[in-house]
Image (cartoon, coloured by chain):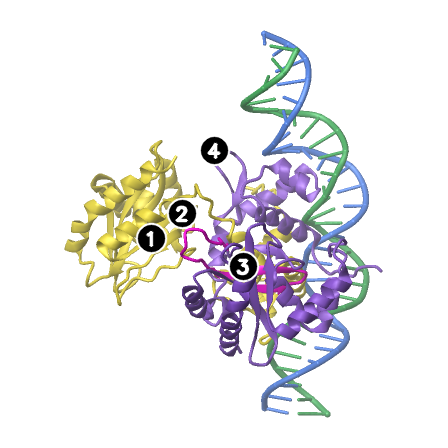
Chain colours: A purple, B yellow, C green, D blue
Amino acid sequence: MEEEKKTVRAVERALDVLLCFASGHEWGLTEIAGKVGLHKSTIHRLLATLEDRGFVTRDPSTEKYRLGLSILELSAHLSRSDDPSVMLLPEMERLRDQLNETISLYVRDRTERVRIQAVQSMQAIRRVATVGARLPLSVGASSKVLLAFADPGVRSAVLTDPAWPAQLERETFAKQLDDILAAGYATSFEEREPGAAAVAAPIFNRSGKLVAALSVSGPSNRLTPDRMHEFAPAIVESAHRMGTMLG
Amino acid sequence: MEEEKKTVRAVERALDVLLCFASGHEWGLTEIAGKVGLHKSTIHRLLATLEDRGFVTRDPSTEKYRLGLSILELSAHLSRSDDPSVMLLPEMERLRDQLNETISLYVRDRTERVRIQAVQSMQAIRRVATVGARLPLSVGASSKVLLAFADPGVRSAVLTDPAWPAQLERETFAKQLDDILAAGYATSFEEREPGAAAVAAPIFNRSGKLVAALSVSGPSNRLTPDRMHEFAPAIVESAHRMGTMLG
DNA sequence: AACAGGGTTTCATAGAGTGAAACGGATTAG
DNA sequence: CTAATCCGTTTCACTCTATGAAACCCTGTT
């Protein structure tokens, strides 16, 4: 029962402070203290440290804290030439031009998914997708792909996670995942966001391991259920082609 | 003499570990220990903490450490709509199209400068500029702009900083800055990198405060000294227009 | 087998991080 | 004009936590 974590508490807290900036770009000291549940003086010290190393800055006018230039510096070193998010970009652009809808690339991170790459549709009404967004694994076409095609161990671990939404009937959800496994792709219609729909297909690397989900998303009046099933083969094929590019 | 820093040592060290990834995207534990000068066990604990919060990951194949998805997530929240690096992008693109060379935007950060935005020339031979790069304030056209037009306090503080290169004659450098102050822009010819040249102009916000340097850079055979002085008025004007967009 | 080079674990100890409380400086209320 | 808030900052005594030396465990090499 005793969690044996060999981590450094002060560092954990500092990183939690940083992660506050994943929701909203500007916070005051007291606000942050409230969010992470620590005393003002502790946060003050942590923020001073983060500021010293350039991870946060204070806005001169508002006196509030923001992310600093070190984050920018590090983010420049995130993608390397052999990184999927860069390697797959040309194929994503090709698919975008073919279907004229926004294309996203997701990976699973524990019990969530993260959009690691995106190219936007050129239409006036389009899905706008920001890279880096972190979304739940319980809703959306890509979520279902990332779970359906994952190792059985991963699937059950996620479904039994304490953070998993209780109102979601586990039985029927698992059934749905099996259907997706058989179909080879997943769709979602106004599931996570009203007015939006998406089709997603799995990307396996050459050793057959699930590495990402490729999704096409747009307004639900363009991406009708019928239309999505029409698109599906092109997406599955595109995802397959991407897979062959990966080790 | 006793530096009264109220920072948290463990956090400082963890951030230094993270900053290792500003040079090279993959490191082993022992390598990092060498870089930051701490014992393996300490680094091990810090890396475990960073990994737990998603700031680093281990590459499954090489077993080495990389930056994690939390950095991606945070970087998505760096630029807000009223952020200079976003607001000025259209004008930077316009200037790029006019001059057909790479355009960069720099801000000063203590005794260095950081490239916070860039748009690349479309020519086959071009200056490639990565956003987030951190460069010395002692060389390059934008460096000289950032120093020449800064508050006198800032200028002298930087020039007397212990980290300032000793071989650089302070007197003549200060003289050069004054010339730039009079001219309204700066040039550099094969100063920092052989084969490269640049022109830079200051951007002041509406309250007259220096906020950034705008630079045009390219191969030195295209950007000859004569050519740069030809370009200068367009760059100064563009920088001025940008300034009026800022609070 | 012996060795080397990475990563992991253990443990006693010092000293570093912690939070309560008090302080200061704006801004707003009365 | 004073009182009352609301932030951020600073101080300080106590304890718990981070530390690094050393030992250990791999895997690959000589």
In this figure, which residue is indicated by the disc labeled 3?
A: A224
- State the residue at coordinates (56%, 77%): A205
Label 1 marks which chain's residue? B
Q: Residues within 10 Å of mark 1 (few under 14, many from 20)?
A: many
- How far, Cα to Cα, is label 1 from label 4? 25 Å
Q: Residues within 10 Å of mark 2 (few under 14, many from 20)?
A: some
Label 4 marks which chain's residue? A
Q: Residues within 10 Å of mark 4 (few under 14, many from 20)?
A: few
Q: Are marks 2 and 4 in contact (CB under 8 Å)?
A: no
In this figure, which residue is indicated by the disc labeled 1?
A: B104
- State the residue at coordinates (26%, 57%): B101
In this figure, which residue is indicated by the disc labeled 4?
A: A61
Q: Secondary structure at mark 4?
A: loop
Label 3 marks which chain's residue? A
Up-down relation of residue B246 to residue B51 (above or below): above
Q: Quadrant of residue A179?
A: bottom right
Q: Quadrant of residue C8?
A: bottom right
Q: Position of residue A36 (x, y in %)?
A: 68, 44
Amino acid at dot 4: Ser
- How far, Cα to Cα, is label 2 from label 4? 19 Å
Quarter holding the N terminus of chain A? bottom right
In this figure, which residue is indicated by the disc labeled 2?
A: B86
- In the picture as drawn, the residue positioned furthest to the front comes out as A226
Label 2 marks which chain's residue? B
The mark closer to the camera, 2 or 1, is 2
Q: Is residue B38 left or right of residue B96?
A: right
Amino acid at dot 3: Thr
Highlighted magenta segment, given as a residue range:
A105-130
Q: Position of residue A150 (x, y in %)?
A: 66, 71
- How far, Cα to Cα, is label 3 from label 1? 43 Å
Q: Are marks 3 and 1 in contact (CB under 8 Å)?
A: no
